[in-house]
Image: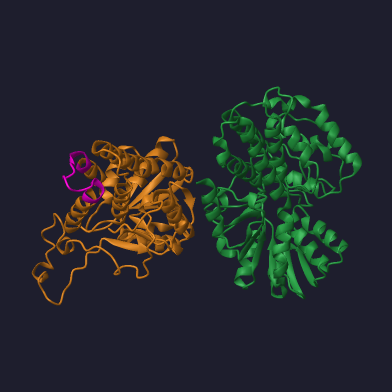
Amino acid sequence: MLQAFQEVVKDYSTPPENTLNRDMTAQISSYVSFLIECRPLSISMGNAIRFVKNRIAKLPITLSESEAKASLHSDIERFINEKIIGADTVIVEHAVTKIRDGDVLLTYGSSTVIEMILVHAHELGKKFRVFVVDSRPKLQGKLLLRRLIKRGINCTYTHITAISYIMHQVTKVFLGASSVFSNGTVYSRVGTACVAMVANAFRVPVLVCCEAYKFHEKVQLDYSICSNELGDPNAISKVHGREDINYLNGLTNNAKLKFLNLMYDATPSDYISMIITDYGMVPPTSVPVIVREYQKEHLLQSSKIVI
Amino acid sequence: MWRESASFILDKHQNNKPISLTHSIDSPPPPSASMADENPNPNPISAYYQTRAAHHGIVTSEWLEQAQAAVRRYPDRDSLVSGRPFSVIEDFNSWRQQPDLAEAVAAIRALAAVIRASEATTMMELEIELKKASDTLKSWDTTSISLTAGCDLFMRYVTRTSALEFEDFNSAKSRVLERAEKFGEISCKARTIIAMLSQDFIFDGCTILVHGFSRVVFEILKTSAQNKKLFRVLCTEGRPDKTGVLLANELAKLDIPVKLLIDSAVAYSMDEVDMVFVGADGVVESGGIINMMGTYQIALVAQSMNKPVYVAAESYKFARLYPLDQKDLEPALRPIDFSVPVPPKVEVERSARDYTPPQYLTLLFTDLGVLTPSVVSDELIQLYL
């Protein structure tokens, strides 16, 4: 999305009676509403958009149009490099120190950061094996599994229904996150909370890896319905590739039956042992500190920025 | 008891050659008839714990002479800082000879002296020198958390000043030196500040359980006694260091009623205890503490019986570690003396310390104030940002 915005900036030209700041902000807002119509924004996208708008608003009026565009372009470039790509490198460095020889790690779904960590640890020569846990309907774990196998990492693939069976063998659980809220609650792919709770019951430490730009100062008390995203109901009523499982075929239009395909769920902070961010390894209680420091760094003297 | 006393100054870790000053160093590993629990083993023993053990004894003037003789006898060992007339290890050791001074504070003072004696002409050079000195000190004993944490925090504190942007190097250097001395002073005074802050928590007629000989906790109890508070102390024996006995001696001298318990009697006596006071070797990022072996047990028992556990730790002990479980720490071993000979096939758990997770701790008394365990990470993030 940020790269698309970079293109927007490049192709932009100020209309005659308007200033760059206001007009571009309005343009970005209209693009954002288009994006929202396609699919609700994720929290990290929201933070990135806030950053871009803040940067636009702070452009000094004295700059010429091409200078302003170049500065915006480089700002976005820097955000991508520092906060996203650079952050991943730092997280990987911290996380591999926690992987010891003989470890049995468990991961859920497919997270890019987790994949980078496991690959890097394998390259460093650490001996470990991985349980990849997956769930319907997205079955994203299969993608991660393929990539790990290609690197030669010892993997086991299982469905989420089997986690209590295998959890006693696991030494550490690594999870990715879509966002982390101020009270330490981790907002991630649906099913993550189950994995974390079962791990907690077996006293296995749960490590969540999340870049700092994904942190948000909101607090969600109700763990699923408060704000979530609904996916395609047909995805759960049908099984891809198995036409014989058609028990729910006639019922999609039934008034009394609702297919609830939730995309996200929230894991309470009690089940999380540590959060690994580009600010280092922190306990879940320190998330508001990071949110505060992060905002101080990037949104200094920010006026009201409305998404 | 002190026939091998001066040996702890010798850097066994760095040189790895058996430097023998007295006969007892080469004596075989335990058991031996005397209570030679400071007997250095061929296996790496945490020098930090040796130092603590040595400090618990009485420093006589002839011991001091021995110590100085030891330092003089092996001058070349200090040429790690490549042949400069000022050596940070020498300075560090000279500070460390005072038993009242914490190791990390000695390191901080030594690093401040490095700045003072430095001949660097640019800020970068000074920082590099400091970093080298700090690394040397840290490698002197890799198991000591407060030493590593103290050095790291000193580096951050000192270089975190806008004075570094001054054109004039000398003024920048003097500013850096000022901050260094200030940090040294704060660390030195930390104990008195902590003692003052904790006075409110000790009420008349209370019973305090203490584990391990922490100088900070001792200072707290001493100050309370001076303020004419009436309280009673239960000391755990603290095997294998026998620190409990030493602490009991010191407290008895101050006329504080003391009762000694063996380590296994903690749960038995927990009913009559009002609060638990422990020190810390290091405070980790999760808010938990690393302290003498047995602290975790006591914290577990205290929590299950709803007794508060208070930790007294100076702020330079905040370390950037985050252990997930007991084995996630750097091992620090110490010799354990069972009075009967142990057959060679039997393994002995010789770890000297354990990790207490933050959920079992009630409050931390630091020179920054009385804090909850979650604030540790807050402070560290702010400092390391």
Residue A229 image offset from top left, x and y in percent: 24, 62
Question: Would residue A189 be found to the left or right of residue A261 on screen?
Answer: right
Question: Would residue B321 be found to the left or right of residue B241 on screen?
Answer: left
Q: Is residue B129 magenta?
A: no
Question: Would residue B285 be found to the left or right of residue B21 on screen?
Answer: left
In the rendered view, tell whether residue A291 sits above or below residue B90. Answer: below
In the rendered view, tell whether residue A220 sits above or below residue A213. Answer: below
Would residue B15 be visible to someone looking at this image?
A: yes
Q: Which chain is green?
A: B
Residue B362 image offset from top left, x and y in percent: 61, 66
Residue B310 image offset from top left, x and y in percent: 66, 64
Tally the marks.
0
Which quadrant holds the C terminus of chain A? bottom left
Residue at 82% from the left image edge and 27% from the top image edge? B73
- Comparing A277 with B46, the one in front is A277
Residue B257 image offset from top left, x and y in percent: 83, 69
Res A292 quadrant in image: bottom left
Chain A visual colour: orange
- Comparing B168 with A76, the one in front is B168
Res A202 quadrant in image: bottom left
Res A230 quadrant in image: bottom left
Would residue B259 be visible to someone looking at this image?
A: no
Which residue is farthest bottom?
A: A256
Q: Which span is picked out in magenta?
A: A8-23
